[in-house]
Image (cartoon, coloured by chain):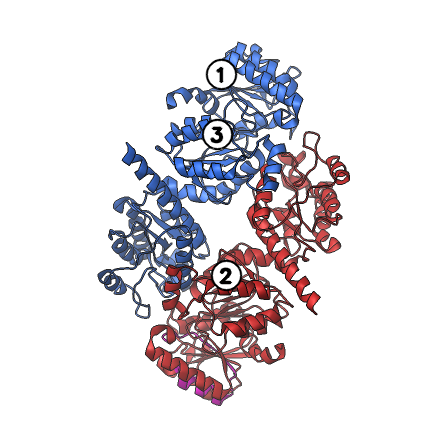
Chain colours: A red, B blue
């Protein structure tokens, strides 16, 4: 399946790009399309195209792509809509195979735009060009070090984000990056005149840098093909979707935005369930849920144990239940074995296991978590980031730097490393709550970097665990059918 | 009503406190109860009580409260449960009127604990002492500069947070403070043996520093009185509640946590609706929603206009609809008048008003927002933090410091000041989305400080607006009855 989409490598890993409509006026699209790849360290050749300039941002500039001496993999088009069909033809003559069309004013702008969009598609088909857009905000490819959409490179990571909204999608991606979620690709798909959501799914399924595909969608073009391809892709990697335009008011807004006609939400939701796409109900949950899917083993079932003090356990239990997870009661032997490890004033160990307000180091938590992961009726654990021995018991009053050379740091590192390795050892997920820590410390650094997802609230933890359980169940179903 | 609760001033504004069970062992409760008020700048006198020490943390220490030379307003008790009833009697003999009982091991720990709790309550009643706890994590009072629960003073602000979970509530309060939400009080209410949620409501209703009361509850003791008092209090200030222990698993967890029996959720929800308490479905939403309630005028109705690009408008519309807000279509005259103010490639102005991806300065947004606020069919606006002229158009490429002395800064400040004043001028709320800004800048500083709540996502904005609309409606209902 995927071999057919290797052709998109010319878009996401181009050795050379031409920016058609390049400009030296700060703030213009034709300026940003040259500036951004330069700033984010694009290693290939950039050819600005502008008949009135000999140089833009220090780069030799050519009147047209035909005049460029070398090969061009990707054309970035920012010139007005009426010029685009001819430019596509010219690109084809030059042997260019991929394009990103930033220009707006096509189907979303009315009848004349719709006609131009058709002309552009015809020119591309005839010339053997695949293109992103039009009316998009560009792309980011980590592996290609190519940014057409961000002024600064976002954090590197395992999520490919396919967004039908450029501005909002880009804003979400920037917030996500700030919060520590990493991206492999960002694609602002615009009007999807040629390449559609389904095509990106197909390409990303074969993309080694991408572990999870997340989508912001307003409406589908060719929904049938989208779900057919999604059904294949979810066998290889999870797909998480936020579907906007669900309400009457929201659907009205999508019309003028990306020329999408929001379809029946019931049908869309049903198809997602059927093919195994995970849906989220708030847009930013895309990143939160994808983080867990990218790094954790899938739980064998939906039965969760919670480790945490008082209210954290209560809210965790409530939200796990709300998301369809089960919290089995502990058997008497396990309850006794864990109770011994709790502080004397804590109640007898149940699920959730209540620390009764005491802070716990990594090794103290590990001992209990291992007992829980060994149970055949527990499929995953929600816990919290342990405290660092370095800033606790009794060094709370001591400058942390004093302790760096003492044993405390080694205890912390050993404990956190063990903690971080548990999901792989037991083949079950662990998710942690940050739990009001004043700032990230060594614990969070060791656990957080690719081992255990860390969130601010019990609800985020439960949502992520539920997504894992859902994807686990859909993978098991697929395997049964094989 | 409130005059009766002025007696709690001895707890929240004490001139002197005695810490019974004071200790110089780092990490012990008896240590933290002396250390924390010292560290957060408590201006009154602290008397550590410990028969085996002459000095703790540099303070003269007394064998018992009876031996203290001066008056004591508040006793903080950390000694083991069996000692507490006698200590309360001793405090009464000393003339102490308030206590915070940190000690655990009462009703939540079984039959013997239940008996001790009864004894303690009897001693307090007979001796004229009101107390917080037991089995709580203490209090924070900004006006009293008294921290028994936080190592560092949280951000100052208009929210009083009453929490039935000490550890989790404290963790939430710390996260909230980091995110910029400010607290006037934090009360970890513990087992509520004497003072109950209802009493704190009554006290906080008359507390000048508190504009909104937020509660984390697991179960009520004397629910009837709680709702009777809440009904009175919501006429003066909003109450927002998160109710935990809703699920079977969650209710099980509350039992061993704070000895609460979670009641019927349906009855609880119904009573909240009836008396006008706002409920949130995730614990941290307490702070988000309270921020808007604390600083904004109430909307005259539930009809909202949204200003923002593409997907932000779509997701904003969806979430407003989901929370019961309406998005009226714009009348033709207004649509024409606003369209003139949009960039040429933007679609005709509808609701949401779509900027089509262009960034807007404060003055550009103000012009549109004023037109919307003037409409009698629009009750509030959701917008986004405008861009700073200083880092945009065309200074994007310029070191921002170069511009500090130029006109750009003045334009920014004037625009933001006007923007920030609109809610009071029109008597309608404005809520902003941060919208993926790389970092807080002058815009966010001016808007954010007590004028316009700023959130990360459209869903947060819609939730806050819905809470305002709900409280507005309940206030109008109350006034009709008067």
Q: Residue at x 36, y 66 (%)?
A: B356
| Label 2 residue SS | strand
**Residue A392 falls in image quadrant:** top right
Determine if marks 3 and 2 fall on one subunit. no
**Residue A437 falls in image quadrant:** top right
Quote the CA–CA distance across marks 3 and 1: 26 Å
Q: Is residue B303 left or right of residue B270?
A: left
Chain at numbered mark 1: B
Q: Residues within 10 Å of mark 1 (few under 14, many from 20)?
A: many
Spot occupied by residue A443 in the image (x, y as percentages of width and height): 65, 47
Spot occupied by residue A219 in the image (x, y as percentages of width and height): 45, 68
Residue A431 against residue B85 in the figure, above or below: below
* Label placed on residue B97: 1
Q: Which residue in the structure is indicated by mark 3?
A: B223
Q: Residues within 10 Å of mark 3 (few under 14, many from 20)?
A: some
Residues marked 1 and 2 touching at CB (< 8 Å): no
Chain at numbered mark 3: B
Q: Which residue in the structure is indicated by mark 2?
A: A242
Spot occupied by residue B105 in the image (x, y as percentages of width and height): 64, 25
Spot occupied by residue B383 in the image (x, y as percentages of width and height): 36, 54
Between disc 3 and disc 2, the foreground one is 3
Tell me which segment is drawn in magenta. A84-106
| Label 1 residue SS | loop
Determine if marks 1 and 2 fall on one subunit. no
Q: Considering the image in quadrants, where does the C terminus of chain B appear? A: top left
Q: Considering the image in quadrants, where does the N terminus of chain B appear? A: top left
């Amino acid at each position: 399946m995927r071999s057919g989409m290797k052709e998109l490598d010319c878009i996401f890993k181009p050795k050379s790009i031409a920016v058609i409509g390049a400009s030296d006026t700060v703030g213009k699209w034709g300026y940003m399309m040259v500036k951004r790849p330069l700033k984010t360290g694009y290693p290939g050749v950039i050819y600005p195209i502008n008949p009135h300039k000999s140089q833009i941002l220090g780069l030799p500039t050519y009147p047209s792509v035909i005049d460029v001496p070398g090969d061009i993999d990707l054309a970035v088009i920012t010139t007005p809509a009426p010029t685009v069909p001819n430019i596509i033809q010219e690109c084809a003559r030059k042997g260019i195979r991929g394009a990103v069309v930033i220009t707006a004013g096509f189907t979303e702008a009315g009848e004349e735009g719709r006609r131009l969009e058709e002309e552009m598609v015809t020119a591309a088909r005839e010339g053997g060009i695949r293109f992103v857009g039009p009316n998009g905000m560009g792309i980011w490819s980590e592996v290609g070090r190519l940014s057409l959409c961000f002024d600064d490179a976002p954090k590197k990571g395992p999520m490919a984000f396919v967004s039908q909204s450029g501005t909002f999608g880009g804003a979400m991606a920037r917030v996500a990056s700030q919060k520590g979620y990493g991206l492999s690709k960002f694609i602002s798909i615009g009007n999807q005149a040629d390449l559609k959501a389904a095509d990106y799914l197909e390409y990303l399924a074969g993309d080694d840098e991408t572990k999870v595909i997340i989508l912001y969608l307003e409406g589908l073009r060719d929904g049938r093909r989208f779900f057919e391809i999604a059904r294949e892709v979810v066998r290889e990697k999870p797909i998480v979707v936020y579907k906007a335009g669900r309400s009457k008011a929201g659907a009205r807004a999508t019309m003028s935005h990306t020329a999408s006609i929001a379809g029946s939400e019931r049908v869309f939701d049903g198809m997602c369930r059927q093919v195994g796409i995970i849906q989220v109900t708030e847009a930013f949950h895309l990143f939160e849920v994808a983080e867990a899917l990218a790094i954790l083993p899938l739980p064998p079932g939906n039965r969760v144990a919670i480790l945490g003090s008082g209210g954290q356990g209560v809210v965790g239990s409530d939200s796990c239940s709300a998301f369809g997870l089960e919290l089995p009661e502990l058997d008497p032997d396990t309850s006794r074995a864990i109770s011994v490890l709790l502080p004397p004033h804590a109640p007898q160990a149940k699920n959730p296991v209540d620390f009764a307000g005491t802070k716990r180091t990594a090794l103290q938590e590990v001992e209990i978590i291992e007992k829980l992961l060994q149970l055949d009726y527990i499929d995953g654990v929600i816990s919290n980031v342990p405290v660092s021995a370095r800033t606790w018991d009794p060094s709370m009053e001591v400058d942390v730097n004093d302790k760096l050379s003492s044993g405390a740091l080694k205890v912390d590192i050993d404990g956190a490393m063990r903690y971080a390795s548990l999901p792989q050892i037991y083949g079950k997920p662990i998710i942690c709550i940050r739990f009001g820590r004043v700032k990230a410390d060594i614990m969070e650094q060791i656990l957080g970097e690719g081992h255990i997802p860390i969130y601010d609230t019990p609800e985020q933890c439960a949502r992520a665990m539920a997504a894992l359980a859902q994807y686990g169940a859909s993978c098991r179903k697929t395997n049964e059918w094989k």
